[in-house]
Every structure is written in structure tokens, then in C-alpha cells.
Amino acid sequence: MSTAPEHFDVVVIGTGPGGRAVAPELAAAGRSVAVIEDELVGGECPFWACIPSKTLLRPSQLRTQAAHVAGVSVPELDWSAIRDYRDYMNSGLNDAGKADWLGGVDGVTLIRGRASVPERGRVLVGDRELTCDDVIIASGTHPAIPDLPGLDREQVWTNREVTSLSEVPASAVVIGGGPVGLEVAQYLAGFGCETTLLERSDRPLVREEPELSAHVVRLLEEHGVRLMTGTSVAEVRHHDGGVEVTTEDGERLDVERLIVAAGRSPRIDGLTPDGVTVEHGHIQVDGQCRAADGVWAVGDITGIAPFTHVAGYQGRVVIDTLLGRERTATYDAVPRVVFTEPEVAAVGLTAAQARERGMDVATETLALSGTDRTETYGRGLQGGVGAVVDRSRGVVVGAWAVGPEAGEWIHTAALAIKAEIPLATLQDFVPQFPTFNELWGALWRSM
């Protein structure tokens, strides 16, 4: 341990979207900030998650889109060129550029190493001791590996291995029917991998509307992914050629790769001093993302909404609070997008969730064919939109969309929910013709 502690106004643990949002702005406001990172500066998203996965999805998306358009040849996929571009997008798993930028911000000190917080106001990193007025924990998560009989962690892939793969496996089993599992299954299948997706619930995206899950089942079938729902793994056996996965109903799947995409676990070991409450593995925070006096937490470790954009938002809430600007986080209009082809998007409450809250619920759906824009994209496109309305207040409280670029136009519904725009106002909405936003206008007029 160094002889004298180093004091900073703020210590930020983690350089993912939460920490990255906080440190430069606090430094610009005159605070001295230490940022601690024990892996790559930038966190999971740019290297092993959002950016490489969307990069790998895009080629097969484009190929699928071309197949629907009259007069357009379906392009061939060049894996070596795709892999090279993926390596460009994830910086070859080299964080030098991001580290140089963050460490070069006036008022920010970048420290490499694993942090612990033995008590509030005190942080240890290797042989260095830091003291601070506030510590912001933005340490992120790691893949949750299920305890399956016979499974060897060193021989299975998680999101890290499957987004940085050098060669496409001939066959794979993907465990998990959530967003990560769906995206992985689709791009592997698009590259020619014989892919089976296992989901222990009775449908994929089980937390979303059943209608949305039905669209997901169809798109997986269209892309050649075998979906097995209501299915759990009974046993795993690794062998020289790959892995044999036995399901609880006795079916044996012999594949080259087993990929686990069944959730994530918070990285909070050693980061919860007295006064910090942990429930179900997540740090509990108030409306300002405060975990205890002088301790703040942002991102997936809070268990509120495991999205990059939420971590950045929570970071901005902490910034405003520390700088004396009153701010309370709200999460009722956070978009959720699965970047498959077509894209699957949702925001707000499902009908079941709204009813659980005692709302007088009305729902409506509309097929993607409800706008002329659909056929300008090609023949045979499937999808649609849906909305949940609280009739007593006359406002939209939930919505979903499946279709081309749905992750872009879900924001129309998100803003309606966030601002609690009266349904009567939305029914008077005049969208541009022809656009997918016309679907929202038609949907709201029918409610």
C-alpha cells in the first residue's frame, strides 16, 4: 500500500456507458475525478456486446431485405471481409484510443486495476489507496453461466466469444430466448451455421406481449433457426468434435459450439460497503441513483433496466444531483429493441403489467400492411404494431413494433408515453406519407 492516500472529489469505478457519461462532465465542472478500469476502457458495449453484435447482424439483415425487393440480386456474404470490418468496429479489442481520450481529459485520472470499497469514501486499487467525497459504481455485469451437469466453462461461448469469433461454427446450440440469444441465433444462421435456440419458457421474449413473441417465432423460422421452447438442458458432454447437449425430454443435440445467452450477473464483489443494500444481486438505489450517503450506482448493477442507454441516463442523473440540479430518474418510457431482421421493439408496460397496476386497459394491434410504406420495402414483409392505453387517463402506457427499422420509429410511441400526450392529441397526429409512423396514427385513431 502506498504511504499516503490520494484524494479525489469523485471516484468512478468502471468505464462503460455509465462511468463514461459521468467522469468528463464532472471534471468539466471542476471536480477532480479518478476513473478505475480493470478490463478495457469503454466497457462491454463497444468490444463484446452492442457494437460487434449489430455489426455482425447487418450483413445477413441486408441479405434478407434484398430477397424481398423486386429486381435486386441477393448478395453473397464474404465472412473474411465481415470479420475484418467487425475487428475495425471493436477496435481489435484494443482500448488504447479510448484510454488516451479519457485519460487525457483535464481533471480525470485513469487508473488500471481491480477496485474494492472497504468503506464509504475509501477505495483500494492494487497498492494505491484513494479517498473521495463520492464514489460512483458503474462496474457492469458478466455472463451468467448456468450450473449444468458436465458443463465446462472453458469450452462454452458467451457473448464475448460469439461476438469475437474468428470462424463461424458449422452448428451451435444457443441457450436463452432473450434479446442476446435471438440476435446471436439469427446472425449465426445467416452465416450458414445450423442453429438451435433453447428457451425454458413457453415463448421467446417472455416479458413482452404474446403477439410480439409470435412475430419472433415466425422470424426465427424464416431464418432457419430451430426454436425449442419449454425446454431446459439436462446434461452437457464435451468431446473432441464439440459438445453434446441433452434436453430434459431426452433429445440429444450434437453440435460444434454451445453458446450461453441466459442472463448476466452484476460485478459488485468488494464494492458494497456498509449502508449499501443488495437485493437479488443488484445494488438498490433511490430516484437519484444513490445507494448510500456518498455512494452512487448506475447501469446494469442496479437491476432496473439492463441497457446501455439507461446506464448513460442514470449517469446524467447522478451528474445533475452532484452539481446541485434537482433530478429524479424515471423509467416508464425506455425503449427495448432486439436488432433482428425485422427489428423488434417495445416500450412501456405490457397489457398484463398495466392491469396489475389497476389500470383500465384498452389494447389494439395493426398489421405492418396498414401503411403503403411496407410494400415500398418489398414483397411479403411481416410485422405490425400494438399499443396499451390507460382509458381512465386517456394516455398510452405501452407499445410494441415489429418491422424494418422499428428501433427507430418506436421512439414516436416512447415520446408519447414519456410526455403522457393525451390520446385525443395523438389521434390528431399527422405523420408523413408514406412512413412507418403512419401506423401509430392509424392505431391511435382506432382506439
Image (tube, helix red, strand yellow):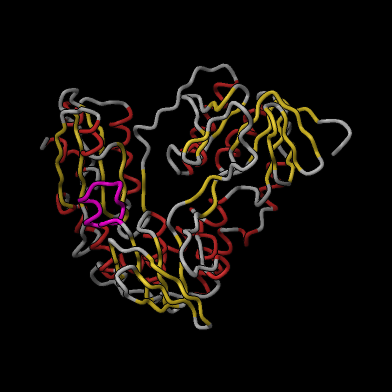
Q: Which residues are magenta?
A: 201-215
- Report if residue 343 is visible in the image: yes
Can you say whether 163 is above or below 270 in the image?
below
- Report if residue 442 is visible in the image: no
Residue furthest out toward the left:
446
Q: Is residue 119 left or right of residue 2?
A: left
Can you say whether 307 is above or below 130 in the image?
below
Q: Position of residue 423 (x, y in %)?
A: 18, 28
Which quadrant is home to the N terminus?
Answer: top right
Q: Observer-nearest residue: 443 or 166?
A: 166
Q: Residue at x 54, y 52 (%)?
A: 142
Q: Is residue 83 left or right of residue 383?
A: right
Q: Position of residue 157 (x, y in %)?
A: 51, 66
Q: Residue at x 58, y 68 (%)?
A: 154
Q: Is residue 382 left or right of residue 5?
A: left
Q: Residue at x 82, y 30 (%)?
A: 5
Q: Observer-nearest residue: 310 or 301?
A: 301
Residue 430 magenta-drawn?
A: no
